[in-house]
Amino acid sequence: APGAYAEEISSFDVDVTIGADTVMDISETIVYDFESAERRGIFRDIPVRDYLDDGSARAYDIDVLSVTRDGSSEPYEIFDEGDYLRVRIGDPDITITGTHDYQIQYTVANGLTQYTQEQVDAIGIAELEPGDVEVYWDFIGGEWEAPIDQARVRVEGPGPILAYECFVGS
């Protein structure tokens, strides 16, 4: 129900640059409004494992490079939560209220699928060739308790985008 959760994410912007080495450099800017609630920070869960249609699992290598709050370095801790890497952001000894801008920078290796001839034939996109890559990534995540008012994802790579689809969860 609208208004049921006092905190909100005003905006969630994700900028992704895919290098020729297929590593994704990701920069997230999250504007989080705690309103009057006293909190120590936020949690960001980043997927480290995804399960494919054939039942196999793909593991991703995540390297968190930096975290800032309102432009200044912010303490963070990383925890292995099975299918996710949990980044606990904030100073455990300081409570904050109001609106804050968080920026999280990290890299993802093994996050792209490189197509084989067999896969290209099955997909049927005329411009697709063996060796082309697919980005299939949950950029925003579904673990947020606070509602997200606006979200934007921008992806840039070393070659043209041949096709795209976007999905939104509940």
Image (spheres, rainbow, N blue to C red):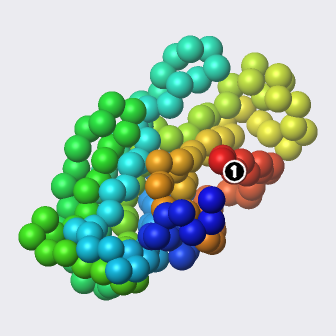
Q: Nearer the viewer, residue 128 or 168?
A: 168
Q: Is residue 73 above or below residue 48?
A: below
Outermost residue toward the left in this view: 93
Q: Residue drawn at (39%, 49%), measured in percent from left and top?
A: 45
Element assignment for label 1:
loop
Q: Is residue 93 above or below residue 23?
A: below
Q: Residue drawn at (66%, 47%), measured in percent from left and top?
A: 169
Q: Is residue 78 above or below residue 72?
A: above
| Occupied quadrant, residue 85 | top left
* Quadrant of the frame with the N terminus: bottom right
Q: Residue drawn at (49%, 64%), measured in percent from left and top?
A: 5
Please state if 23 lies on the left or on the right of 112 as rendered: left
Q: Can residue 14 be seen in the rendering of this structure?
A: no
Please state if 76 lies on the left or on the right of 20 as rendered: left
Local packing at callout 1 (Cα closer than 10 Å; few below 14, some 14-19, many 20+) is few
Instruction: Point out residue 53 in the picture as x, y percentages from the top left corner.
Output: 64, 20
Question: Which residue is labeled 1 in the image?
Answer: 168
Kind of residue sitting beneath label 1:
Val
| Occupied quadrant, residue 130 | top right
Q: Residue drawn at (82%, 29%), measured in percent from left and top?
A: 123
Instruction: Point out residue 47 in the picture as x, y percentages from the top left corner.
Output: 43, 41
Instruction: Point out residue 122 in the picture as x, y percentages from the top left corner.
Output: 82, 22
